[in-house]
Image: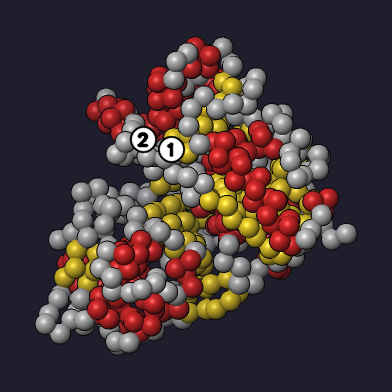
Amino acid sequence: MQKLLLALDQGTTGTTALLLTQDLRVLGKFNVEFPQIYPQPGWVEHDPEAIWQSTLQAIAGVLAATQVDAQAIAGIGITNQRETTVIWQRATGKPIANAIVWQCRRTADICEQLQQAGHTDWVRARTGLPLDAYFSGTKAAWLLDHVDGARNQAEQGQLAFGTMDTFLTWRLTGGQAHVTDPSNASRTLLYDIGERQWSDELCELLRIPKQLLPTVMPSAAIYGLTHGVPGLPDGVPIAGIAGDQQAALCGQLCLEPGAAKCTYGTGAFLLMQTGAERVASRHGLLTTVAWQVGDDYFYALEGSVFVAGAAVQWLRDGLGIIDKASDIEALAASVPDSGGVVFVPSLAGMGAPHWNPHARGAITGLTRGSTRAHLARATLEGIALSCMDLLTAMQADLQRSIPVLRVDGGAAQNDLLMQIQADLLQTTVVRPEVIETTALGAAILAGVGIGWFANLAHAQAVWRRDRQFEPGAPEATSQLRAQWTAAISRA
């Protein structure tokens, strides 16, 4: 019987299960969506039980679709939406409330109070993160404060906290393993990325009882064995865990300092591996843990473009310029350039390196001759220019140029966008054969965890390139970059 890896990609809107062979070929995948819950404006929740059911259904679905016997699964890797927070009863495994999703802004006031009290620089020095409602720590504190009896139960050790990797591992092991990895721990505001452990001082600041927290283990390790899971045999090791963007960095095999990847989805996430060196950004980027293998820690710089593929969706749904998202490539390619039109896609504010939450989208350079094709091309250019700003900031922080950018995500399949990106960056852009790099990273870590791969580098032999985009002459995009700088100031 051919042995396989099961990768669970637990995302914001659904859970995907993938089966991969030992040479990391995707044998099959199956996705199950679950409901989004919006109790009031700015609040976002998930039902943890719905996520667990989506996981079971995804596993059953991929096994049925591939007609694979579950006994063939040699190890499980988990990657997850980061920062989403759930607390549950240790005795029963039952959540005390819905999970608070990473997008939820209900703790913004708490973060603002901490900022006004002067804690911003102190927290960033220890966590690599700004004080923001995005991260898990204040979400956990909110649950303890607003669920009857929760804080008292937490102090007595009766409750368990986790991000979705921790919750799924608990469920998969029948409650035997309360664990996480450093890539997820580093997104909580509770983990000191220099000391590489939960911080008593950070827990005290955010009022989190330390007994609530999971054990932090390397990203490739045997976290526990399956027990009592419908559709899976007992004894399958959960052997790899990483947050989704770090898993994509691993799946792209960005194993050397300076290696970078960009995931183009609804937003765009650009991560650069910085090796054992924890680089403090001078340009508003996040410093985070990439992964830990054995005793070796790897750090990364991270920047986010809040609106990337979502800008294309806006052209489709808001303006009706295209019928489906994939139409944008042909429309944009029908003109040689954007005719002077510049689109700053800051429809939800600006992230790094500009950090302007009040910024709004801007379209400049319109003339009587501007057409929907020019706007379509300007949209692709706006996405690429936003990512250019991130990589320029990363190169400045690391003080080295980046010869190659590896790309993934749905919008990375747009050849024109990738060519524009290469031209603007003056960097080779490489797209892999396996576009599900988030799940691939989890599978690679699990492969290391169960001993299939001696180390991450061993997986290089089975990483396969789809297409490479070489940059054109820099003079061709110099005017566009100047127009972008002017447009940014107006957004």
**Residue 447 visible in image:** yes
Q: Distance between the residues labelled 1 and 2?
A: 8 Å
Please determine whether, in this image, residue 80 is positioned above or below residue 217.
below
Give the residue drawn at x 57%, y 36%. Answer: 49
Residue found at the far left of this picture: 368
Left or right: where 400 falls relative to 178: left
- Where is the N terminus found, in terms of image quarters? bottom right
Q: In which quarter of the image is residue 401?
A: bottom left
* Amino acid bearing label 1: Glu
Q: Are marks 1 and 2 in contact (CB under 8 Å)?
A: yes
Residue found at the far right of this picture: 1
Among the two numbered marks 1 and 2 on one chain, the one whose residue lies closer to the N terminus? 2
Circle 1 packing at 10 Å, graded few (<14), some (14-19), many (20+), is: many
Disc marking residue 39: 2
Task: Locate residue 426, reporting x and y percent.
Answer: 39, 76
Task: Locate residue 353, reporting x and y percent.
Answer: 31, 54
Please determine whether, in this image, residue 141 is positioned above or below residue 454.
above
Give the residue drawn at x 55%, y 32%. Answer: 162
Query: Label 2's element?
Result: loop
Give the residue drawn at x 75%, y 45%. Answer: 231
* Amino acid bearing label 2: Pro
Residue hosting label 1: 45
- Where is the C terminus found, in terms of image quarters? bottom left
Circle 2 packing at 10 Å, graded few (<14), some (14-19), many (20+), is: few
Near-viewer residue (120 or 296) = 120
Near-viewer residue (196 or 90) = 90
Disc marking residue 128: none
